[in-house]
Amino acid sequence: MKRFAKLFAAIDQSTKTTVKVAALADYFSDAPEADKLWTVALFSGRRPKRAVTTTRLREWASEAADVPLWLFEESYAIVGDLAETISLVLPPNPTQDDRPLSHWIGALRQLRDMEEAERKAFVLDCWRVLGGTERFLFNKLITGGFRVGVSQKLMTRALAQATGKPEAELAHRLMGNWHPDEVNWHALIEAEDASADASRPYPFYLAYALEAEPETLGDPTDWRAEWKWDGIRGQLILRDGDYFVWSRGEELMTDRFPELARAIDHLPPGTVLDGELLVWIPGSDAPSSFNALQARIGRKTVPKKLLKDAPVVLHAYDLLEWQGQDIRDRPFAERRALLEVACADLPPEAAVRLSPQHAFDDWSALADLRLTARAAQAEGLMLKRADSPYLAGRKKGDWWKWKLDPLTIDAVMIYAQSGSGRRANLFTDFTFAVWNGNDLVPFTKAYSGLTDAEFRKITAWVRKNTEERYGPVRKVKPHHVFEIAFEGIQASPRHKSGVALRFPRMARWRHDKPLQEANTLDDLKEMLRIYG
Amino acid sequence: MEEGGARAPGCDRGPVQTRRGTYISAMTRDPVLQFTDRGIYCPAGDFHIDPWLPVDRALITHGHADHARDGMGRYLATHEALPVMRHRLGDVALEGIGYGQTRRIGGANVSFHPAGHVPGSAQIRVEVAGEVFVASGDYKVVDDGLSTPFEPVRCHHFITESTFGLPVFRWRPQADVAAEINDWWRGCAAAGKTAFLGAYSLGKAQRLLSMLDPGIGPILTHAAVENTNEVLRGQGIALPDTTLVTPELVPKEHTRALVLSPPSALGSQWARRFGPQESAFASGWMALRGVRRRRAGDRGFVISDHADWRGLLWAITETGAENIYVTHGYTDIFTRYLNDEGWNAEVVPTQFEGESLDTGDVA
Ligand SMILES: [Zn+2]
């Protein structure tokens, strides 16, 4: 595990991408193939099958460290990472382990067939022989979820450096449904025919937010406009008589959207669509809110009733593969024309619909249209350059999201809670309230939006102005007013205030605003009436 | 906090049961030390320990800004703590006392004992009619080679910090961390980069200085660090040679250098003129990967002037105290653990900050 730990430390310690890529390229040049394969797999979110529940791991670690379970749990809440908490509470071991990563993966595989007692003894022994980063990484292998600050893009770049293959080709090879148990390094990275996997998606093209005025984009006739939907970005793949649905986070979601299977009957194989998954009740003129979709994605298998109450339709806005050909290099206008042909006669039961384009003569007409986005349940507009190819990843220039300005309300901070992980020693989670007569009614929590310097400042203030403590939560003196920005508002009987906000965050610390001038519950209800 | 401050439990109930038997709390029914909204107060001696609001008479555990504040009528601290306090607080009424020396103040016997936190730091022992409190300020139990090493003081009531009061905090031997830092410096020097090491200027910075291997290259200092170096050298503490970074200093003439600076100077305009560089931060908080990734720059070294989990428990056990007051840090969790383990522990809110990553220059 020594070599893998060294790679991990190099990546984890540095904030410089050049250092990370160099460390990875080094590793990919000389590590054993099985280790390389697993490293790519781990860094792209794949992992060995879980052999031990986290409940058992906590119990065993607390026992081995001679720390009561509640104290272990409190420590975990502050550290924010189970693998790290376990490796820190156990007695240190400074020795290094020479066995390769694939050995430990193999060991975890054996673990699955063991009896519980044997399994425990095995894990305790691993904890004893591994120390420091190696022990942490071993725990990560068990618990899954390597978040190492290496994007797929950096890993692909390093692979390109180490193998001499183009980045774009490697990016495509790494997508899809492969698992290191079922493929080897040669087949995945080096073999000529990389198209064997019918489920393999294309890397998503991601837009930047438009910060400047649209006039800066130049001639409006070069651009196409669509709604920016508030749903889930998805890629629908129709190949070999089968269908696959991928999320932007490269998660295979096929089972969650069984209605999309019907697309097989209406679109030819060798078709790949990029679009937005939305809950759309037949007959209504706008999609349902994101909440309806949330109920769908929370379920691995969808009950019949939910399928009927919250039917999902893919609103297609791009065509990446047509008649088995990768057409991402062709101009957007051309892909769009083909997409319109493909979607021309789709019946409602196909569960695929063409996402409309909005014609516009000048930017000001488009600006007016954008203001009506909320009524269409859209977040704003997408602007796409007519002659742009479909690129991979987030690239500036050809695609822009031009979102509506958020809704805002001025609220009073009343509770504070410290963060975990990166922000373990700062107060970062706050509860905000609005006035109802002389009472402050909590209506939302918010975690983000302040700078590190502001978090430090508010942390110092919270320490000195705590009125009561409830475990990790502190009630603070009502004093500070913050502008809370959010994307949507909905009635919610579960909340005391009767409303729930979408994407609330702290937009500004209103030092200028006296406590009494924060907004009221009536203001919030008025917003609900207009925008809910 | 209640008007007049929380009372130490057990003290106003007459006879007090301790682990070592029963003794009688003397005539006064006042506790020896009270926790008030100005700080820790001793009614029998009419003085405060490390107060955060102005009082007439302040006994100070050590010179860090959250313990030695401005605006007190008179100050009493160890001889070794005075130079730094004079440097920080200017022309105020300071009086010194030797470690272990007993002073009668009103009805209280007071003495100062090494806390091992920074040079001059002390635990303050207060005895009234046979009942003993120890206010430990900030402390660590390992010898850093610079501060007078921590000595446990037997008492009935022990006031402790808990900055790192979680079992995930476990410090490695100082020599191991020193080797790690010197390896990093050597690597920077070989790559033609200047090594910037961030640490708070009183205590930590000098401790790091004493751990550095001057054979690797020259050691440069930020003025905030150098000022404190001067003060400590002036009181006879040996530190390696350092060169102050002035506007006139030409970085090119100091290849292979390590620059010791406050954390706030890392990556600043001030640092940038040194060209290619790596930055590192030395703090107990660097034990947590999340914090390390947020704050460390290129490297984080785990080193603290506060006790780790086992250090805290060892110190508390050694005092033999039955009643433990936890002033700052992970107070709720640490107190719960102590109570589970049979101590009589409670949280007493104070304005001490411990080893802070995120506010000013306190440590
Ligand atoms: Zn201190």
Image (cartoon, coloured by chain):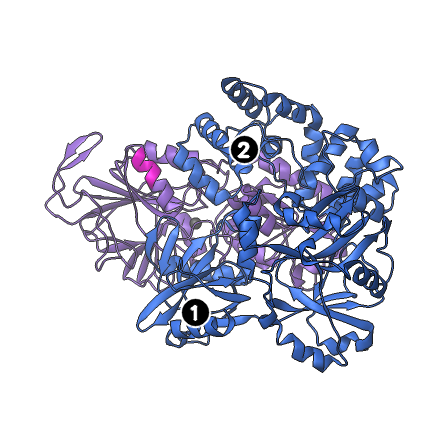
Mark 2 neighbour density, 10 Å: few (under 14) some (14–19) many (20 or more): many
Residue A39 lies in what quarter of the image?
top right
The residue that label 1 is drawn on is A411
Q: Which chain is purple?
A: B
Q: Vertical placement of A287 versus A269: above or below?
A: below
The amino acid sitting under disc 1 is: Ala
Foreground pick, A432 / A137? A432
Q: The residue tagged with tag 1: helix, strand or loop?
A: strand
Foreground pick, A191 / A36? A191
Residue B109 percent across, percent down from the top left: 23, 45
Residue B309 percent across, percent down from the top left: 43, 36
Q: Which mark is residue A214?
A: none
Residue A347 percent across, percent down from the top left: 71, 58
The residue that label 2 is drawn on is A87
Residue B195: in sight, yes or no?
Answer: no
Number of marks in picture: 2
The amino acid sitting under disc 2 is: Ser
Residue B222: in sight, yes or no?
Answer: yes
**Going by the image, does A355 lie left or right of A78?**
right
Viewport quadrant of the N terminus of chain A: top right
User: Which chain is disc 2 placed on?
Assistant: A
Of the chain colours in the picture, the one used for chain A is blue
Q: Residue drawn 31% across and 63% down?
A: B54
Residue interval drawn in magenta: B336-340
| Residues tagged 1 and 2 counted as in contact (Cβ below 8 A) | no
Q: Earlier in the sequence, mark 1 or mark 2?
A: 2
**Going by the image, does B84 lie left or right of A319?**
left
User: Which chain is disc 1 placed on?
Assistant: A
